[in-house]
Image (cartoon, grey):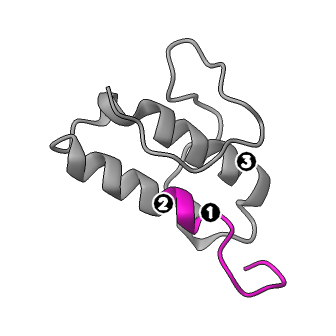
Amino acid sequence: MSKTGKDPCKPFACAIQACLTENNFQEYRCSEVLERMRLCCVKWHKESLCCSGINLEKSYLQNPKVEINPEVSRSKK
C-alpha cells in the first residue's frame, strides 16, 4: 500500500468492474479501462493489491495510445 494507506489502483479496478457490468462482461468493450489499470499497475504494482493478475507487459489496446497518467473513466462504445 502507499504511504496514505489507500491502494493507488483501486479506482481503476472499480472502473473495470463498472465497465464490465455495463457491457455485459465483454472485455473488448472495456479495453481502454483495462489499459488504464495496467498503466497504474506498471507504476504501483509493488504497493497495489489490485494489481495481482494484471499482465504488465501486454497492452490491452490494439493500438496503444493511452497517456501515462490516465484519468479514471469508463469506456462507453
> Magenta residues?
1-13
Residue that appears at 74% across and 71% down: 47
Q: Residue at label 3?
A: 42
Which numbered disc, 3 or 2, marks the residue that appears first in the sequence? 2
Q: Residues within 10 Å of mark 1 (few under 14, many from 20)?
A: many
> Badges 1 and 3: C-beta atoms under 8 Å apart?
no
Q: Nearer the viewer, residue 68 or 73?
A: 73
| Image coords of residue 12 (percent x, y) | 54, 56
The residue most toward the bottom is 5
Given the image, on which type of amino acid does mark 2 rest? Ala
> Badges 1 and 2: C-beta atoms under 8 Å apart?
yes
Q: Residues within 10 Å of mark 2 (few under 14, many from 20)?
A: many
In the image, which disc is placed on residue 13?
A: 2
| Image coords of residue 17 (percent x, y) | 34, 57
Q: Nearer the viewer, residue 67 or 28?
A: 67
Location of residue 39 with respect to 76 vertically, above or below: below
Q: Residue at label 1?
A: 9
Residue that appears at 56% across and 68% down: 10
Q: CA distance from mark 1 to mark 2?
A: 6 Å
